[in-house]
Image: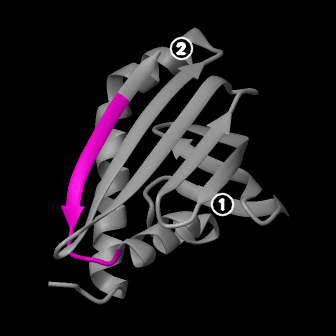
């Protein structure tokens, strides 16, 4: 199983950062490796997404369920191929000059070779993903401080 956590203060309003993360359909525009993301079902507090990402030399298509807790948390889960279990938990906390963001990523692949690949490259890939969100926030969101 691969686990990784990232915690960052950001000089942007919690509401703006939450909306940026919740807008999964825009991920292919700025997140490295994201080829497509389409919401296929939606309710007031959740949505299902079909996504395709490139993991190094592999291309994976999968579905996730995203649950929204406005301006506090976003939980993303999947438990069907290629995943045995995927949990991505975003947490958003207000602070004086912006927000504090936490991301916890937990992933177990069904395939041993994919799990080994993830264990080897996962930390770099999660850091690159976070960096892409920070870059997008700097390019599109108004600063609080």
Q: Secondary structure at mark 2?
A: helix
Q: Which residue is mark 1?
A: 36
| Residue drawn at (51%, 73%) of the image | 19
Which residue is disc 2 drawn over? 113
Earlier in the chain: of badge 2 and badge 1, it is 1
Question: Residue at left 47%, top 15%?
Answer: 1
Measured along the vertical axis of the image, is residue 13 above or below residue 64?
below
Q: Residue at x 31, y 84 (%)?
A: 139
| Residue 17 occupies quadrant | bottom left
* Quadrant in the picture for residue 27: bottom right
Q: Specify the quadrant of the image occupied by residue 58.
A: top right
Q: Quadrant of the C terminus?
A: bottom left
**Relative height, residue 138 to residue 119 (above, below):** below
**Position of residue 82 in the picture relative to residue 57 (left or right):** right
Percent position of residue 122, x then y? 37, 32
Q: Is residue 110 left or right of residue 137?
A: right
**79 shown above or below 91:** above
Q: Residue at x 33, y 60 (%)?
A: 93
Residue 2 at x, y percent in the picture: 42, 21
Q: Secondary structure at mark 1?
A: strand
How packed is label 1: few (under 14 Cα within 10 Å), some, or many (20 or more)? some
Labelled disc at residue 102: none
Q: Is residue 6 shown in magenta?
A: yes
> Real-space Cα distance between discs 2 and 1?
24 Å
Q: How many marks?
A: 2
For the record, the magenta segment spans 4-13
In the image, is residue 111 above or below residue 16?
Answer: above
Colour pattern? one colour
Residue 143: give x, y in percent of width and height: 23, 86
Q: Main secondary structure of the magenta part?
A: strand
Tell me, yes or no, whether the two marked residues, 2 and 1, touch with CB atoms within 8 Å: no
């Amino acid at each position: 199983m691969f686990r990784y956590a990232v915690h960052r203060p950001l000089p942007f309003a919690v509401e703006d950062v939450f909306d940026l993360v919740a807008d999964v359909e825009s991920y292919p525009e700025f997140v490295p490796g994201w080829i497509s993301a389409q919401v296929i079902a939606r309710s007031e507090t959740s949505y299902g997404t079909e996504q395709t990402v490139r993991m190094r030399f592999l291309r994976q298509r999968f579905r996730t369920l995203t649950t929204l807790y406005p301006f506090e948390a976003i939980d993303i889960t999947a438990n069907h191929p290629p995943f045995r279990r995927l949990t991505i938990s975003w947490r958003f906390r207000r602070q004086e000059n912006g927000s504090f963001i936490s991301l916890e990523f937990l992933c177990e692949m069904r395939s041993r070779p994919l799990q080994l690949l993830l264990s080897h490259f996962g930390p770099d890939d999660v850091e690159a993903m976070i960096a892409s969100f920070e870059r997008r926030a700097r390019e599109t969101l108004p600063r609080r401080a």
